[in-house]
Image (cartoon, rainbow, N blue to C red):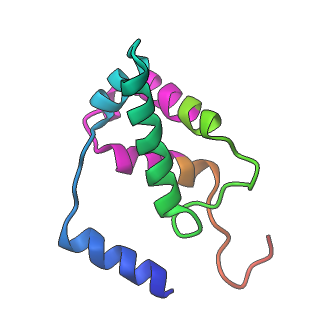
C-alpha cells in the first residue's frame, strides 16, 4: 500500500514523458542497436515500475515478449500512439495481466 501511495505521489508531482508511442515505435523499428536498446530499456523500466501495482505478469515473462507486445500494439493501434509511452505500456500489461484484488483467490 505504501508503495502504491508513493508511486501516486510522484506521478502527481512530476510526470516526465520521455517517449510517446510514435517515438517508441520508431525506436523499436530502427536499424541501429542504440535506438532499439534504448526503447527496450524504456519498456523494461516502465514494466518494472508498475510490477505488482498496476500489472502482475507471470515470473517467466521475457523482455523480448514485452517488446513484442508493445510493438504489436503500437503497429495495430495508430490512434493511440500520441499517448505517452508509459501510459501505453502500463495499459497493455494491465490488460494482459491484471493484479488480483485483495481478498480474492488467484
The quadrant holding residue 65 is top right
- Up the image or down, 23 lies above or below 101; here it is above
Horizontal placement of 47 versus 105: left or right?
left
- Up the image or down, 9 lies above or below 79; here it is below
- Up the image or down, 56 lies above or below 42; here it is below
The residue at the point 66 percent across, 82 percent down is: 102
Q: Magenta span has 78?
A: yes
Q: Decide which of 62, 52 is in the foreground and name it.
A: 62
State the image coordinates of residue 71 (x, y, percent, origin top left). 48, 27
Quarter the C terminus occupies: bottom right
Horizontal placement of 17 versus 24: left or right?
left
State the image coordinates of residue 5 (x, y, percent, origin top left). 39, 83
The residue at the point 23 percent across, 49 percent down is: 17
Q: Which residues are magenta?
A: 69-92
State the image coordinates of residue 50 (x, y, percent, origin top left). 49, 62
State the image coordinates of residue 31 (x, y, percent, origin top left). 41, 12
Q: Decide which of 29, 98 is in the foreground and name it.
A: 29
Q: Magenta span has 82?
A: yes
- What type of secondary structure mainly makes up the magenta span? helix
The residue at the point 53 percent across, 70 percent down is: 53
The quadrant holding residue 80 is top left
Count of labels in the image: 0
The extreme right residue here reads: 105
Amino acid at each position: 500500500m505504501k508503495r502504491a501511495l508513493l508511486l501516486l505521489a510522484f506521478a502527481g508531482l512530476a510526470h516526465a514523458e520521455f517517449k510517446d508511442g510514435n517515438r517508441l515505435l520508431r525506436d523499436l523499428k530502427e536499424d541501429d542497436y542504440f535506438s532499439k536498446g534504448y526503447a527496450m530499456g524504456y519498456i523494461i523500466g516502465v514494466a518494472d515500475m508498475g510490477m505488482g501495482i498496476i500489472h502482475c505478469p507471470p515470473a517467466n515473462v521475457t523482455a523480448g515478449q514485452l517488446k513484442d507486445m508493445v510493438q504489436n500494439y503500437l503497429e495495430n493501434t495508430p490512434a493511440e500512439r500520441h499517448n505517452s509511452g508509459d501510459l501505453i505500456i502500463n495499459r497493455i500489461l494491465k490488460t494482459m495481466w491484471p493484479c488480483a484484488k485483495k481478498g480474492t483467490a488467484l
